[in-house]
Image (cartoon, rainbow, N blue to C red):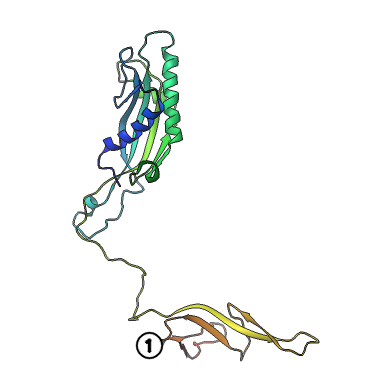
Amino acid sequence: MDFTSLNEVTNTLISIIQNAVDPGVTVQVRPEILRNSELGVGFYLYHVQENTHFKNYPALGKDGNPVAHTPMSLNLYYQLSANWKENDVEVALEEQILMSAAMKALHDNSVINTSSTGKNINLKITLQTLTPSESVQYWAAAESPVRLSAYYEVSVVFLEPEKPTSYAGKVLNYGTFVFTHVAPQITASESLINYTIPGDPIVKEVKISPAQSFAGNKISFLGNGFNIGTPKIVFINPILWHVPKKPMSLGR
């Protein structure tokens, strides 16, 4: 992951919006672009929340305080607004044009990953479905009137953890193993069944896998690790046999 602070995430998103709007329009991180004095688009980070899914991300090593050695996973919440500097009757329409360009850019780039930025990231931009009354609450404490705004969630942002000084061993399989080499493993079974076609004196045979056989016929088990130690195979049938049949040794 290439993010060490929140401003790097914001700068990445602002560059996407800036490429979509007119070069003369400035994209700023202020919560509000001052009407009649500034021409631009505001993209303001107003809330941060820890992502619950990756909250207990396991640490790589065995260092003390493992939380410090796990990436901090965050969901970021942004407010998008626009301002047209000229004071005329078309100001609201011009602001809507800026908002359309910015929203289209975030929609078309809703997934930001390593291939598009060169950073080791995978972000998803989602337009929030706020009700009109909820949207007004964000402006209720401000001195300016309600403005056209859109609200976005950006997830999941991983902030780089502290570098581990130790590493845990790799666990490939769980269980109790007493083999010093490769454990015996049966990969397949097969059997040959002989049959004749009426009117044809030649006996034919067919190979069946998994094996199916009648009493007295031969079944072959294929696998690896049979030449290590003295592995045996046990047949169990709780209906026909009260005890397992005598184990058979497996050969190479």
Question: Which residue occupies 27% across, 35% down?
Answer: 7
Q: Which residue appears at 31% of the width and 37% of the height?
A: 9
Q: Quadrant of residue 195?
A: bottom right
* 105 relative to 94, above or below: below
Q: Quadrant of residue 87?
A: top left
Q: Secondary structure at mark 1?
A: loop
From what the image shows, is residue 20 above or below residue 8?
A: above
Image coordinates for residue 184, horizontal then vertical, percent: 42, 80
Residue furthest toward the right? Answer: 199
Farthest residue, direction top: 88
Specify the quadrant that holds the C terminus. Answer: bottom left
Q: Nearer the viewer, residue 118 or 180?
A: 118
Question: Label 1 belongs to which residue?
Answer: 229
Q: Residue furthest front?
A: 23
> Is residue 144 shown above or below 132?
above
Does residue 8 appear in the picture of this structure?
yes
Residue 49 image point, x, y percent: 31, 39
Image position of 205 (left or right of 187): right
Q: Tell me residue 121's x, y (percent).
A: 35, 45
Residue at 42% over, 82% down: 225
What is the number of callouts on the image?
1
On screen, 41 above or below 37?
Answer: below
Horizontal relation, residue 161 to residue 104: left or right: left
Q: Nearer the viewer, residue 221 or 243?
A: 221
The quarter holding residue 102 reads: top left
Residue type at mark 1 is: Gly
The 10 Å Cα crowd at callout 1, few under 14, some 14 to 19, many 20 or more, is few
Examine the rendering and report whether any part of residue 139 can be seen.
no
Residue found at x 54% / y 80%: 189
Q: Position of residue 111 (x, y in %)?
A: 42, 40
